Image (cartoon, grey):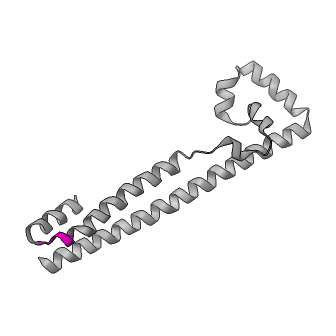
C-alpha cells in the first residue's frame, strides 16, 4: 500500500526516471517471495546425495515420506528390525539420511539468506522512492 501511494504521488509530479526505484522495489519483493518459497520447499536431486546408484533402488528406512508411502506398519516394523540387526547397513542408512538432511538444510539456509537480502534491498528501494517523492513533491 505504501509503495502504491508513493508511486501515485510520483505520477502527479515525477518524471519517467522516478519509476526506476518503485519498479526495482516491486521486482525485489517478487524475488523475496520466490526465495521464501524456495526455502520452504527445497528440491534435491537424489542422485547427488549418494555415490552408489544402486543405493537409490533401496527405499530409505528413515525418511518419513518413504516410510508412510512405501510400507504398511507391520511390514515397516519387520524391515526396520532387519536393519537393526545389521550394524553396517544401519550406519549406512543413518549416514545417508544425515547427508540428505544436511543438503536440505544448506539449501534452505542459502534461500533464506537470499530472501533476506532481497527484502533488505526492497526496503532500500522503497526508501529511495520516498526520497524521490519528497524531493519532487
Q: Residue at x 81, y 29 (%)?
A: 80
Q: Nearer the viewer, residue 53 or 107?
A: 53
Question: Does 17 lie within the magenta span?
Answer: yes
* Vertical arrangement, residue 29 with respect to residue 134, above or below: above
Dividing the image into 4 quarters, which one contains the N terminus? bottom left
Q: Residue at x 38, y 68 (%)?
A: 121
**92 relative position to 30: left or right:** right
Which stretch is magenta?
Answer: 14-18
- Residue at the limit of the structure toward the left, as seen here: 12
How many numbered tags mark residues here? 0
- Residue at the limit of the structure toward the bottom, as seen here: 135
Residue 61 appears in the figure: no
Residue 37 appears in the figure: yes
User: Is the magenta region chiefly helix, strand or loop?
Assistant: helix
**64 relative position to 23: left or right:** right
Residue 113 position in % (x across, y down): 52, 62
**83 relative position to 111: left or right:** right
Question: Does 16 lie within the magenta span?
Answer: yes
Q: Residue at x 52, y 56 (%)?
A: 111
* Vertical arrangement, residue 31 with respect to residue 125, above or below: above
* Vertical arrangement, residue 57 with respect to residue 113, above or below: above
Q: Residue at x 49, y 61 (%)?
A: 114
Dividing the image into 4 quarters, which one contains the C terminus? bottom left
Amino acid at each position: 500500500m505504501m509503495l502504491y501511494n508513493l508511486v501515485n504521488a510520483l505520477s502527479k509530479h515525477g518524471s519517467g526516471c522516478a519509476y526506476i526505484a518503485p519498479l526495482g522495489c516491486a521486482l525485489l519483493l517478487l524475488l523475496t517471495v520466490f526465495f521464501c518459497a524456495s526455502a520452504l520447499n527445497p528440491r534435491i536431486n537424489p542422485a547427488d546425495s549418494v555415490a552408489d546408484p544402486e543405493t537409490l533402488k533401496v527405499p530409505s528406512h528413515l525418511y518419513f515420506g518413504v516410510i508412510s508411502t512405501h510400507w504398511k506398519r507391520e511390514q515397516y516394523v519387520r524391515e526396520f528390525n532387519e536393519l537393526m540387526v545389521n550394524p553396517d547397513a544401519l550406519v549406512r542408512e543413518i549416514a545417508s539420511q544425515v547427508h540428505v538432511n544436511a543438503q536440505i538444510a544448506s539449501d534452505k539456509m542459502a534461500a533464506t539468506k537470499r530472501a533476506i537480502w532481497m527484502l533488505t534491498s526492497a526496503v532500500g528501494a522503497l526508501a529511495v522512492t520516498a526520497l524521490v517523492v519528497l524531493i519532487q513533491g
